[in-house]
Amino acid sequence: MQTQELQLMKRFETDSKWFHENINKLREQNFTGKFVAIANEKPVASNEKIDAVIKTLENEGKNPACIFIEFVYPEGFTLLL
Amino acid sequence: MKIPLQVYEFAGGLRAMAHFLIRAENPHLFGSIQAIVDTGSPTTILGIPDIKRMRVSPLQLKELESRKQPHAYGGGQLKTKILQEAKLKFGEYFECIMPIEIPVDEITECTQPTIIGVDFLIKNKLKLFFDPAKREAYLEGLE
């Protein structure tokens, strides 16, 4: 795998880890029910609609395809797959 | 050969999760993905939020083969297209080319994540080790 791709994956995994480890903190900060984009271990955009999050990132010159975006489910909510 | 997975508390339970890069040429598609490894799902299917992140439009999917039967999905039905040659790269550990399914129905407010299904395990001769109590998970080659 090319170095650039490896770096991209590493950054994505780090932001994913940060999201999952700080999910309760995000809930306290009123991100529940929203999609949150995480970059460099901090939230950089959020909205109830993912389209709005994507647009914000694009307006800032970021590529949403490579940025960690996840939905903050309410505490106690169970997603059955 | 082992592909390490992460075990996170997500949407009401502990899940084994994989991170990978996906790439396809027709339609062009590239992005980083977090997926839940779900042995209850026979197929690997991209989540709608990930499709949106990668800016895949319904027009781009027009030429792809449709799955014959829709999936039962969140109490409803979901039609999918089959992307035959998706390249999945799991860091330095593993890469493969395999068919994956892409939802084509626009579902409002859909938050369903990408799922790695049993087809991925069969195609790549992998078994899943998942010990939620120790928060340990990985995929291991059978050969």
Image (tube, helix red, strand yellow):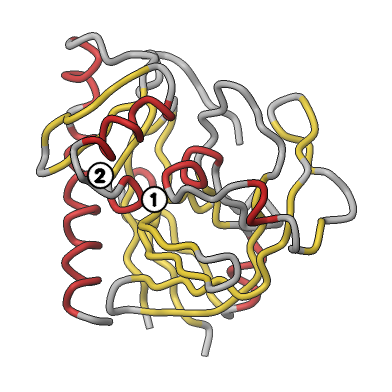
Residue type at mark 2? Ser
Residue B46 sits above or below residue B85 on the image: above
Residue B80, disc:
none
Residue designated by label 1: B34
Q: CA distance from mark 2 to mark 1?
A: 8 Å
Residue in the image at 57% along x and 27% along y: B110
Q: Residue furthest bottom?
A: B143
Which image quadrant is residue B42 in? bottom right
How far from the left and from the top, in percent, is residue B82? 72, 62
How far from the left and from the top, in percent, is residue B139? 44, 69
Is residue A20 among what the camera can see?
Answer: no
Residue in the image at 65% along x and 28% along y: B107
Is residue B65 among what the camera can see?
Answer: yes
Residue designated by label 2: A16
Residue type at mark 1? Gln
Residue in the image at 10% along x and 44% along y: A40
